[in-house]
Amino acid sequence: MTDQTITAVPSADPAPRSRRAPNRHLTGWLMAAPLAVVLGLFLILPILTIVVVSFWGATEFSIYPAFQFDNYAFLLTSEVTWRVFGNTFKYAAITWVCTLLIGFTVAYYLAFHIRSLTWQVALFLLCTIPFLTSNIIRMISWIPFLGREGIANSALLSWGVIDAPLDWLLFSDFSVILAFVHLYTLFMVVPIFNTMMRIDRSLIEAATDAGASGWQTLWHVIVPLTKPGIMIGTIFVVTLVMGDFITVRFMSGSQSANVGRLISNDIGLLQYPSASATAVVLLITVLLVIGVLLRFVDIRKEL
Amino acid sequence: MTTIPKVRYSRRSMLRTGAAALGATALPAPMVWGQETKDIVLRQFGTGVSNLNDVANKVKEDLGFTLEMTALDSDSVTQRAATQPDSFDIADIEYWICKKVWPTGNLQAMDTSRIIQYDNIVGIFRTGKLNPTSTIAQGTAPHTVGFVEGPGGTEFVDNESGWMTLIPTIYNADTLGIRPDLIGRPINNWSELLNPEFQGKASILDISSIGIMDMAMVCESMGEITYADKGNMTREEIDRTIAIFTEAKQNGQFRAFWKTFDESVNLMASGEVVIQSMWSPAITAVKSRGIPCIYQPLEEGYRSWGGGIGLSSNLSGMELDAAYDYINWYLAGWVGGYLMRQGYYSAVPETSKAFMTENEWGYWFEGKEATDVITSPTGDELAQAGETRDGGSFEERMGAVACWNAVMDENQYMVRKWNEFIAA
């Protein structure tokens, strides 16, 4: 069957194909060229540079070309690196769970409970309003809110819920994750909402007709069909959290570290080779995580 | 008239400062010719502290040439001075940076005979002693990296050789800042930073080279460690210092660490922190919000820092002459007065006196009670009549310096340990 089609196609109309072939190839290459050049210049080349520099050596205020494994050796044998990578994964995992739960719920509500398309669009736009201000401002505005003499603590005190201000609200892992969830939930909402909107409603009716309860429909029909959206959202959230450094620095009051902060510290101290090595290890880690995620869902097929 | 521009001061400063200003104007007489002077552009870079646009404007007004200012953080400043000698004419750097950068040969020594006010430069920068009886503090004391043997010298010498590496411009003594209203008792020692009484209410700055010094002041004050030289610790001393602070961190002593000026102001002003390492203008910023804040003098003394301007080795001819004019102008008092009214000190305080009111001079330099409102050069009220400066007079503050900002031989090791401390 397959042999037939492969051999059949060229034999069907050999004359025009051979005439057009070089031309068509050329057009194809030309059409692909702009994107290839842009990606090559602005993605591949910088990454290659980072990889190359990660093998260089550094003195206190200069770097020199070399091919040595010192940076990696120090990085991979240091206990700090492992602890910091562990911390980074912890932030990513907790943020992922929170954004997924909130994001799925919001998307589900928008897609299945709001009937009119106008309201769906209006409410969806409402979700994006916080994004009209900068990332940093949205994050920093938590600081006065959560502070020892902030609104949260004074409200809780005046309601009599607590006797003394809660210190763990700010400059803690709690505040870091809170900021992450606040910043990145929308990245979960959008792709999930998008896939949910494309679920054929008759499938849900069919499930109901077949006697499925609401939870059964959700678990056996909607969740499987929403997987590609969940996966795209997951990739967004995980890569954003793992690459972040500024949120962790501000919200933990510089008291916690993640990989991004290791890199930013190294850059501040002009240790570019060491920063590059850390960046390469982080890049490989993130690619591995994404690789594993893609094993679960074939996004290309589902889209 | 167009050939030789005169040094002009505004009518107001002339009237205000009277005869003293007249004396000062005579000193920095420019030696370069007017029309060509206007085409000269000197590129200066340095940390934000003294890279002020007001200074560049005043240079244009008084000396006629253009000064381009670039402000960078101290790591970038070090890198630039060390690796890009063609990108600047004048480097405004700290003395510990000079120690790192001088061996690269990117800066040239200055002939002190061309520095008009040389003999009046504060003793700290020449002999290391504020006055003949003072002891020399630990760390990178400015005079130890202040002189080289000759014009092309690469080794620092320990005497006034006549060839200076940096002309001192600005310096100060740092200590802990406290919130007296939230502490309610006197604070007299560095060790109070780790006092469990302030658990969850202390902070330290997350800039390793300076933070480690503050840590050392604390550990020494606690009686835990005695350092041979806080500015040049051994690996063992670094380990022990970091260990003490790591333990404190894990016990929740610190509310946060700060890296920028604004962060330190916000931590203090919001009451999140009641005691922390701080810089002088940050105290002023907290006070200007009406919140009580003291730059607490401590028994063990101050951690001090100083900056100066150095000349690129590429400078020659008329540009070099212009640079000398600039240095002489810098020491002639206007800039000094400007900086001293922010709470810093200038290298030749006497010339600055002419550009300050008697009240300002008394408050900032002599440690006297203000007789009238003290305002900053930008017009913010900093103190009311009757208040005195924290720490008192110049002699009291600069005479009690325990160590200078420094760069250690074990710097890279220290930085790694610092990263461990932050991640702990």
Image: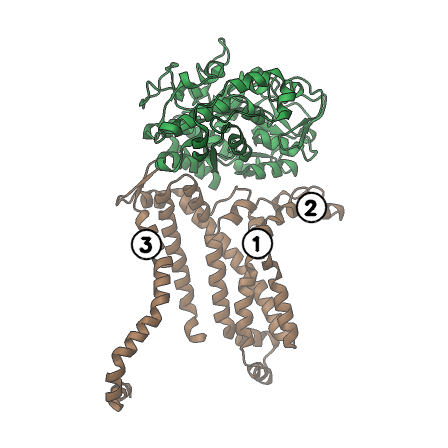
Chain colours: A brown, B green
Q: How far is mark 3 from mark 1, CA to CA?
A: 31 Å
What subunit carries mark 3? A
Residue A37 drawn above or below residue B218: below
Q: Is residue B368 left or right of residue B52?
A: right
Quarter of the image with the N terminus of chain A in it: bottom left
Query: Label 1 neighbourhood size at 10 Å, few (<14), some (14-19), many (20+)?
Result: few
Q: How far is mark 3 from mark 2, CA to CA?
A: 49 Å
Taking depth in this image into account, of A65 and A170 the one nearest to the observer is A65
Q: Is residue B17 left or right of residue B130?
A: right
Q: What kind of residue is marked 2?
A: Asn
Secondary structure beneath disc 1?
Answer: loop
Q: Are marks 3 and 1 on the same chain?
A: yes
Q: Could you tell me which residue is drawn at 32 percent across and 30 percent down? A: B104
Residue wearing tag 1: A134
Residue wearing tag 2: A153
Q: Could you tell me which residue is drawn at 64 percent across and 34 percent down? A: B286
Query: Label 3 neighbourhood size at 10 Å, few (<14), some (14-19), many (20+)?
Result: few
Q: Of the residues tagged 3 and 2, which is closer to the observer?
A: 3
Quarter of the image with the C terminus of chain A in it: bottom left
In percent of width and height, residue A185 lies at: 56, 61
Q: What kind of residue is marked 3?
A: Leu
Residue B50 drawn above or below residue A178: above
Q: What kind of residue is marked 1?
A: Ser
Taking depth in this image into account, of B224 and B84 the one nearest to the observer is B84
The label on residue A48 is 3
In percent of width and height, residue B62 lies at: 52, 28
What subunit carries mark 2? A
- Tag 3–tag 1 contact (CB < 8 Å): no
